Image: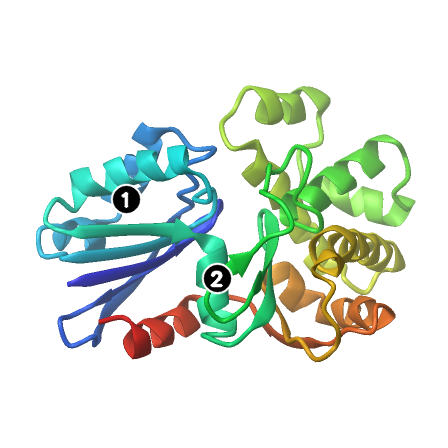
Amino acid sequence: MILIADGGSTKADWIALDSNKNEVFRVRTLGLNPAVIQEEELKNRIINMFQLINIKDEVTEVHFYGAGCGTPKPVQILNKVMQEIFSNAEINIAEDMLAAVYAASGKEPAIVCILGTGSNSCYYNGTDMEMVAASLGYTIMDEASGNYFGKKLIRDYYYSQMPKKIAEKFANEYDLDADHIKFNLYKQPNPNMYLATFAKFMFEFKEEKYIKKIIKKGFEEFFKYRVLPYKKDASTPIYFIGSIAHYFGDILEKVAKKYDLKISGVIQRPIDNLLDYHKANIN
């Protein structure tokens, strides 16, 4: 049995294949970002999914692509957890950026971007990934991500910068008590995921001028720091992965056009494309 997983901070999609690479089942667990989630919780999130535990002794390979897996220490933590659970398997862990590349461009050169709970980008030359900078996460980077927009919405609400009609709807949908917010930001695990939950509000009110404005500004920041530094022209394909790019694709196109660039494709969930890549290229 072979397991292929695309793991973000909020959720992880898993597909199980038999020895002939036929799909057996697929499941979704909570996110498995080892940079922000404790080891014991990582383990619990896997073993609580009965489909995975039912086949744990039959698994011979695990190919896991995940948020937070771009530096050695988090990879070591997750590898230890995986090895304890899937004790008969060869464990392969790579960052989610590589999954995005495989899902979007396969083996072709392209700029590939992620706009999920966090954000990132790379230029893939057909063999290797080149990045502008290491991702330092939600506190100082992650432009145009779910947690970036979550912070923006909360700040605008508290500073009375949000239009009154939208502020009323925002207050009806979320617990905006200051103590509740601070408890989740500073006392609870995974504040990046907590912040990203507020970004869902934008999807419901995507036609509002205020929402369009903050989305546009976020995308412009992302292009400034995560796309333009690669110094590529419109001949280089640009792909985006994630729900924010998917739901606000029209604004994304306009921002790209502002810089004389063109979006080649947007993929909301990369797991199916990743599966196709594995079937075609992984022995």
Q: Which residue is mark 1?
A: 46
**Is 221 located above or below residue 43 in the figure?**
below
Which secondary structure, mark 1? helix
Q: Which residue is mark 2?
A: 128
Task: Give the residue type at disc 1.
Answer: Ile
Foreground pick, 53 / 4: 4
**Is 152 located above or below residue 277 in the figure?**
above
Residue 231 in view here: yes
Foreground pick, 259 / 179: 259
Give the image location of residue 168, x and y in percent: 82, 43
Foreground pick, 263 / 12: 263
Which secondary structure, mark 2? loop
Instruction: Please tell me which of labels 2 and 1 falls first in the chain.
Output: 1
Residue drawn at (13%, 71%) of the image = 19
Q: Is residue 259 left or right of residue 175?
A: right
In which quadrant will I find the N terminus? bottom left
Foreground pick, 273 / 132: 132
- The number of callouts visible is 2
Task: Give the residue type at disc 2.
Answer: Asp
Task: Report how far apart the C-alphas of labels 2 and 1 lie in the structure.
Answer: 30 Å
Give the image location of residue 140, x and y in percent: 69, 34
Q: Nearer the viewer, mark 2 or mark 1?
A: 2
Give the image location of residue 109, x and y in percent: 55, 73
Residue 173 in view here: no
Residue drawn at (47%, 50%) of the image = 8
Quadrant of the rendered image containing residue 216: bottom right
